Image (cartoon, grey):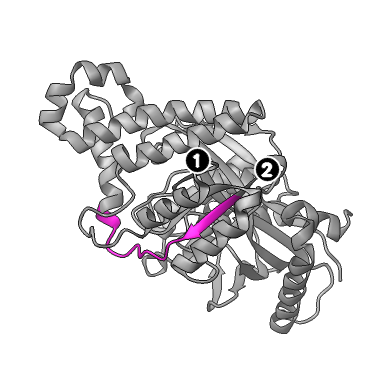
Amino acid sequence: MRNFEVILNELYGEKAADKQKSRYNKALDEFKALYGGHEGIRIFSASGRSEIGGNHTDHNMGRVLAAAVDLDVIAFCIPSDDNIITVKSEGFPMDTVDIADLSVHPNEINTSAALIRGVACGFEKNGYKIGGFKAYTTSNVLKGSGISSSAAFEVLIGTILSYMYNEGGINAVNISKIGRYAENVFFGKPSGLMDQLASSEGGFITVDFKDIKNPVIESIQYDFSRSGYSLCIVDTKGSHDNLTPEYAAIPNEMKSVAGFFGKSELRGITYETLRDNIGAVREKCGDRAVLRAFHFFDENERVVRQANALRNGDINTFLKEINASADSSYKYLQNVYSSDNPGVQSVALGLYTAGRVLNGRGASRVHGGGFAGTIQAFVPDDLLDVFTNEMNSLFGENSCYNLRIRPVGGIEILYFK
């Protein structure tokens, strides 16, 4: 059995190990208060993720670059000899799911119970074993931050079932696909696969969705902690309410351009095809759709250059490509603020402030879906305190999070107190 402190250092870094140890001990106490003292308690963790490159490319069979981060959801578990999965998540009511019934329950849509039942159903459909367990979970994955708390929870449940009932033999890709299935079919959210893959795989990964059923996934070995930069996510406190039409318009408009040429996604055509027919496409689909399509083509190639820069240890080229992505998202993808509510532009304000502080160094970009929520910044270590203070002053205390790239994805941690 690996030393618990060694595992904490690997997941969270040495500076955060003591704080994490307190978090785990508190979770253990909560578990015992719920279920009593038990031998053989098993501990699991699944990470949040950050999209690094490929803003709004995955839904048109494009490429993405993503990374697991050190914000995670952890679970203390024991198996049960019935078909009941019982999960108490900190701050939420108890979920009790009878996995003898793996049908979709409409009353569970948008709930964690739906994700639990959906993951169990996905396991059974793929011929894997399932069984009951009792768990207490706690998460520090920021909701609404683009770090994907739902994917982390899906990967956590999948990792538990893999280790408890399948000897840990289910690989990260299959756990990811099952998580997406649960989110799409049971939870009711039409998400892609990037979030689950990044959470389940760990480290930096690129994903090419050209073959959506068999995406090409490559891990990138790069120690970002030695780059001289810090990864920051800034919560601009913008509301996601009433933004569903804005999010839906991006893939719909991109696909309308593809549809002009008889294709279902933009990956089915080329930049040259669009350029050579631009007049007719503008008339049929509109200028914003054309601009978003151009963003897709350029962003798809940027992901390749970003990944190669990391492989080669070329941080300067990597940052240059991040800034190019930011510029494209702002001008052409147009997902920095809602056109229906131009008086609210917290993401744009965050990007402006980041630019002033960084002053030509590092990089900053809209993070995730956009329109509200978070920005991402790669901050020189010597500017980290200044950057953090500026963002906290603008958006409130604890708005700026300094994240660490996590080298592993869903994992079982053996810890006996």
Region of the chain picked out in magenta, as a range: 231-245
Describe residue 198's horizontal placement relative to residue 186 as left or right. Answer: right
Residue marked by disc 2 = 228
Q: How many marks?
A: 2
Q: Quadrant of residue 281?
A: top left
Instruction: Report the amino acid beneath label 1.
Output: Gly
Residue placed furthest toward the left: 283
Q: Where residue 4 sits in the image (x, y, percent)?
A: 84, 60
Q: Which mark is residue 360?
A: 1
- Seen from the viewer's position, the closer of residues 296 and 354 is 354
Residue drawn where x is 45% and y is 48% of the image: 355
In terms of secondary structure, where does tag 2 sit?
A: loop
- Seen from the viewer's position, the closer of residues 189 and 292 is 292
Describe residue 310's horizontal placement relative to residue 375 as left or right. Answer: right
Residue drawn where x is 23% and y is 30% of the image: 257
Q: Quadrant of residue 239?
A: bottom left
In terms of secondary structure, where does tag 1 sit?
A: loop
